[in-house]
Every structure is written in C-alpha cells, then in structure tokens.
Image (tube, rainbow, N blue to C red):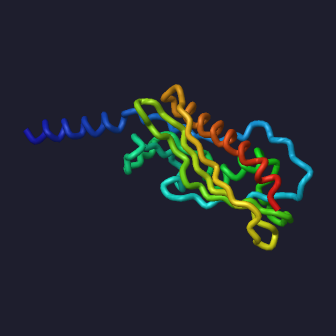
Amino acid sequence: MRAAILIAVLSSLLLAGCAKVPPTHYYHLAPGEAAAAAEAPSVGVRPFSVDAPYDRDRLVYRKGRRDAEVGFYAYHRWAAPLATMLPALVARELGAEPVQPGGRYERYLEGRVVTFEELDVDGLPHAVCELELRLVSADGETLWRGTVRGERAVRTTEVSEVVEGMRALLIEELRKQRPQLGSAG
C-alpha cells in the first residue's frame, strides 16, 4: 500500500515538473518619432521617481475604480525600469534628452510616476497614467510645474494593446503640456 502511495506522489510531482510554463513577455515603451526640437535652451530629463507599486518590473492592473487591491501580471513585464524608460519617452516627445553623464543643461525636467496601470472597468481595460513634472533651472529654481494625467479605453484585453494604449495616452497628454513647458522660464 505504501509503495502505491509513494508511486502516486512521485508521479504527480513528475507530471507537475513537466507542466509547460507560459512565456514571459517584456514591453518597452518605444518612443516612436521624436518631436521637433525647438530653438531653446538645452533640457535634460532626469530619471523619474516612481511610486509603489509601479516601481517593479511587472505591469500593474486594478479591477475597478474603487478597488484598493492591485494585481501584477505574472508573465508581462517592463523591459526596463519605468524610472528610466518613461523619461526617455518624455524627453523624446518634448524635444529634450535624457541626462547624460557629463552633460551640461540649462534646464532639467524632473518627474514622478504617480499612476501607470491598466484599470478594468465594465470588462474593458483602460490605460491610466499620471506623471508630475517639474522644470528647474540649472541652479534648482522651479520654472514650471505640471501634471500629465489621462485615461483611455482599450478595445481589446491583449496586454500588448494595453501597453500601446498607455504609450499613446502618455504621448497625447505630453503634447497638451508642451506649449506651457516651452514658454516656461
């Protein structure tokens, strides 16, 4: 009897070990075409601070507007930290550049990632983003503050399309801020 139980347990473990693990998908917020750079003082975009739970490599989702519980996709992850990937996208869209070691800039754009997630509403995913931005002079004086905030429904539940919705939403909201940012200081 014990031998039969032992064989059953070992068989179960062997079968569990042979189970196929789903592939992990990595997403990069490829910036696309750069916005036209204006004749303006050089602006360096510093790495952003990132609020929890977005400071991880896993994509975050929430199942409802009032739901305090957040979820993390197990097999869908960011290809790079949002602290550096988002500033690269922002820099490219605003005609600036990510701060380079030894680079000298007349102004710096600093940011904070407040929200960057999928929000499921009525069975349909929405891309949600909120970034706080601050333009400072080389000596640290605040020249401009703004918030880039938006939400947009995504027509499919495919995670890759949700990520594309996040990227498109962020670019759209940045374009709205560009005139104010360009006239600052």
Q: Residue at x 48, y 34 (%)?
A: 125
Above or below for 102 versus 39: below
* Residue positioned most to the top: 155
> Which is more toward the observer, 51 or 28?
51
> Which is more toward the observer, 5 or 145?
145
Q: Which of the 4 image quadrants contains residue 3?
A: top left
Q: Residue at x 65, y 36 (%)?
A: 168
Q: Is residue 62 left or right of residue 135?
A: left
Above or below for 131 versus 36: below
Q: Is residue 180 left or right of residue 131?
A: right
* Residue positioned most to the left: 1
In percent of width and height, residue 44 lies at 79, 59
Q: Is residue 99 left or right of residue 159?
A: right
In percent of width and height, residue 127 lies at 54, 38
Q: Residue at x 82, y 48 (%)?
A: 95
Q: Which of the 4 image quadrants contains residue 11?
A: top left
In percent of width and height, residue 94 lies at 78, 48
* Residue positioned most to the bottom: 139
Image quarter hosting the N terminus: top left
Image quarter hosting the C terminus: bottom right
Callout count: 0
Q: Is residue 46 visible?
A: no
In percent of width and height, residue 111 lies at 66, 58
Q: Is residue 24 left or right of residue 92?
A: left
Q: Is residue 84 visible?
A: yes
Q: Residue at x 37, y 49 (%)?
A: 69
